[in-house]
Amino acid sequence: MLKRFAVPVIFLISLSFMAFYSTGDKAHGYIGVKKCGMCHKKDKDGAQLKVWEKSAHANAFKTLKSKESDKIAAEAGYTTPAAETEACLKCHASGYNAAKELIGKKFDVADGVQCETCHGPGEDYKSMKIMKDRKKSIENGLHAWENEKEIEEMCKTCHNPESPTYKEFDFKKRYEEIRHNIPGK
């Protein structure tokens, strides 16, 4: 009797492994802005952490904790507080729906729209050895934007009329506020 079930079970397990590994997709872990910021804070390197800290992105999750946000969520038909509503979280927080095993010790969803929202979960590309090699960084999960058009499209996944608080989005103006290139590059 046991043999009768063993073959189909082994076959199904094999299929699931093949499906996962044949796509080449790998779920990358989140490390959080505190970890990213350790290397991305010097002025000579672009002071990315400082740019983010001064941005609305750094407070995006905090805005969901207000009574006003809960009211907006309720008016949109949601029964959960804004800070627990997926439709709100998808644009106000990184990693809110990631599996627990993909969340690093220093990651905090309350840090809002952080580095990994735009650049991808950093667990596998965080090392200096990988970060110094763009190709390896991309292979290990870095979202690399080739031009401003790609960046604008990514920004508009949240900054769009689907949001109940949407205001006209001037990409050029807003991008200059959050832009954090390495000087000279």
Image: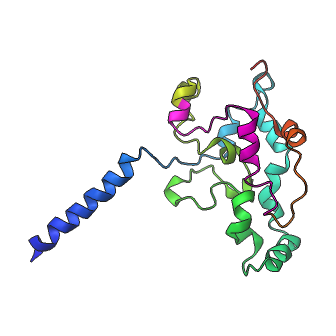
- The image quarter containing residue 62 is bottom right
Judge whether 58 appears above or below 63 on screen: above
In which quadrant will I find the N terminus?
bottom left
What residue do we see at 61% from left, 44% from top?
120
- The image quarter containing residue 53 is top right
Q: Is residue 132 left or right of residue 83?
A: left
Q: Is residue 174 left or right of residue 155?
A: right
Residue 153 within the segment the image draws in magenta = yes
The residue lying toward the viewer, choosing from 171 and 115, is 171
The residue lying toward the viewer, choosing from 130 and 24, is 24
The residue lying toward the viewer, choosing from 111 and 117, is 117
Residue 64 within the segment the image draws in magenta = no
Count the marks.
0
What residue do we see at 68% from left, 57% from top?
109
Judge whether 121 appears above or below 100 on screen: above
Q: Which residues are magenta?
A: 137-162
Q: Residue 40 appears at what percent x and percent y?
A: 71, 32
Q: Residue 50 appears at what percent x and percent y?
A: 82, 37
In which quadrant will I find the C terminus?
top right
Q: Residue 6 appears at what percent x and percent y?
A: 15, 68
What residue do we see at 81% from left, 25% from top?
43
The residue lying toward the viewer, choosing from 125 and 151, is 151
Judge whether 76 appears above or below 37 on screen: below
Q: Residue 166 appears at what percent x and percent y?
A: 86, 60
What residue do we see at 73% from left, 45% from top?
153
